[in-house]
Amino acid sequence: MPETALQPDPRRWKALAFIAVAQLMVVLDATIVNIALPSAQEDLGISDGNRQWVITAYALAFGGLLLFGGRIADLWGRKRTFITGLAGFAGASALGGAATGEVMMFGARALQGVFGALLAPAALSLLAVLFTDGKERAKAFGIYGAIAGAGGGVGLILGGVLTEYLDWRWTFFVNIPFAVVAILGAMAVIHDPKGSRNRSTLDIPGVLLATTGLVALVYGFTRAESDGWTDTLTLVMFVASVVLLAAFVAVEARVKNPLLPLRVLLDRNRGGVYLSLGLAVIAMFGVFLFLTYYLQIVKGYTPVKTGLAFLPMIVGMIIGSTQIGARLMTRVQPRLLLVPGFLVGALGMLLLAQIEPGSSYAAIVLPGLILLGLGLGTAFMPAMSLATFGVEPRDSGVASAMVNTSQQVGGAIGTALLNTIAASATTGWISSHGSEARSLGRQGFENSAAVHGYSTAIWWAVGILVVSAAIAYVLVNARAQGGHEVSGDGKDAGTADEVQAPVMVH
């Protein structure tokens, strides 16, 4: 390998800044539109039955196409895929902001999902191939992890401000300046490391099976939330997803150039990260959802005040990611960050599960959010790094896509599963506490029933985070990411030539 290949890219830190801007835009979009949805629904005349498609159209396209987007980044080049994703996302956002009816809105959201599926894995895989030194990688992923974790909370604040003081359309238009800045920066400072492109052909059967299987899975959970778990089409979607994804695995085991090489998925450490991260996202989505309802409906907070109420969690995530995770990642085993991180997050959830209609924000919600942010910030950052650590550069796009896929599927499952649990608990409370309706008053009775549902669902989220910690403890056994490549058994993966990665000169 020539000496030049061993040198770090001198523009890597500038590249990180623009990758972070793009990541923030994608993560913001996951929650910013939720705040604007009631206003957009009224303006565009979207029926209650169709309202969910503003969220679902994005989730299906994004979740279904992530693996394809990750492989495109490997084959086509990460920089080119990154810029294409940014430009397409900005165009789709402009279309959404200018929407004149529900069809135009749904189409714009689906297009956002398509280009987001190109952008997200390209961004993460660029980090994976640009930062190979342990200490630098820890800092880079600390920043990236903080944005990935806290961006959803920032979206709630920004969505509230834009909706309340400007117009819901600005929750779409705000993506355009983000994209323009990231595109100009990427064109100037981002370069794919030499030898990191995958020159093989695209696995078309794999693309079709993975995309349709993931779309069926995400849509199945979306329908379960709105139409029930025993709905015929819901069950058909679940069966179809199992069949299609099983066929996908069978195809990947046999084809010469698979879309998702099973070596990426079956690596013990990466598999543990994908699974524990997906479960943690299920729990986190539940908190965003139910605390937003609790603060706005029960406590009467405005959209802006609701967003600001999540600020302590954002601060906790940034501290956990950059000050705890990044500082310790090169010194301790990843599971010594993942396990305590998930458990501290569970402790925060445990506090939030104590909410009642008259609970004080300062006494219960505030400390709960701080602990949740600290815990998940500490865990998410080494998880994202380990998911792409030691992977061959030609597979970094698809390995990055699997991180995003586990989060997307986790989000879809979390919303459907926890919503169902909350609704069932609320119904049960109403039937067993009917005698209290008169003493509590109508509003008080409805609030008590709703909060019982939220609390029950958050208790489940506590359990899910404990399971995440257990999975990380059992499966993740890699050594500290101190500059050596890591293989599936936690040992050094070998020389630079063996792992085909540009290695830093220490």
Image (tube, grey):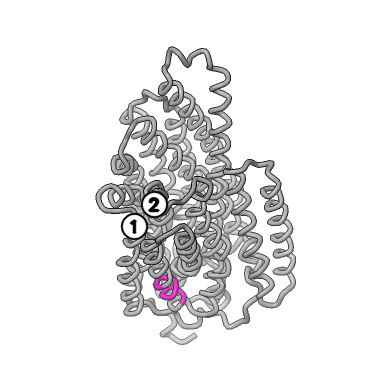
Instruction: Label 1: state its secondary structure.
Output: loop
Instruction: Label 2: state its secondary structure.
Output: helix
Quadrant location of the C terminus?
Answer: bottom left
Stretch in magenta: 81-87
Q: Is residue 376 left or right of residue 156?
A: right
- Figure quadrant of residue 231: top right
**Picture coordinates of residue 204 (x, y %)?**
66, 75
Q: Which mark is residue 169?
A: 1
Q: Are marks 1 and 2 in contact (CB under 8 Å)?
A: yes
From what the image shows, is residue 234 above or below residue 400? above
From what the image shows, is residue 425 above or below residue 276? above
Q: Which mark is residue 304?
A: none
- Crowding at dot 1, Cα within 10 Å, few <14 / some 14-19 / many 20+, comes out as many
**Picture coordinates of residue 196 (x, y %)?**
50, 79
Q: Which residue is mark 2?
A: 40
Q: Nearer the viewer, residue 374 or 149?
A: 149
Closer to the chain start, of discs 1 and 2, is 2
Tell me how far mark 1 sits from mark 2, CA to CA. Answer: 8 Å
Q: The residue under label 2 is which amino acid type?
A: Ala
**Picture coordinates of residue 77 (x, y %)?**
49, 79
> Can residue 26 be seen in the rendering of this structure?
yes
